[in-house]
Image (cartoon, rainbow, N blue to C red):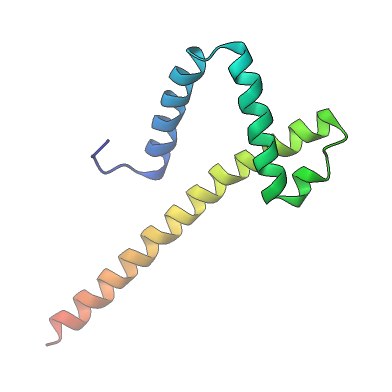
Amino acid sequence: MTEDFEAQDMINYAEKIAQEMVSAMPDDEAVLMVRDFIRVLAEWQPAVHDQIGDPAMLAITALSTTRLFELAFLKAYSYSERQVAAREAIEKVLGDSK
């Protein structure tokens, strides 16, 4: 992937890759991946760790945390694009005034 992508394009591309990977993943490997991923999330995010005793809430909290990452990525990417555009506009104005 060497092209310039918008944030949503990157998410769509990542979704395609994930779908391909999960379709080739054996069931037991999926179980191990979920357990390992939950363990990592629980170490990183106290809200996930707090749900360790309740499997349903643990799943919901882990899923919402991973979804939060996607939404935060979109927000951060948009912010970064605006910052770059503002910087370029300032540089253009200052460059033109010389």
- Residue 59 lies in quadrant: top right
Residue 16 in the image: above or below residue 8: above
Residue 65 in the image: above or below residue 95: above
Residue found at x 87% / y 33%: 54
Residue found at x 88% / y 35%: 53
42 displayed left or right of 2:
right
Residue 77 on image: x %, y %: 43, 53
Residue 56 on image: x %, y %: 82, 28
Residue 71 on image: x %, y %: 56, 45
Residue 19 in the image: above or below residue 76: above
Residue found at x 38% / y 66%: 83
78 displayed left or right of 42:
left
Closer-to-camera residue (85/57): 57
Residue 48 on image: x %, y %: 75, 43
Q: Quadrant of the C terminus?
A: bottom left
13 displayed left or right of 71:
left
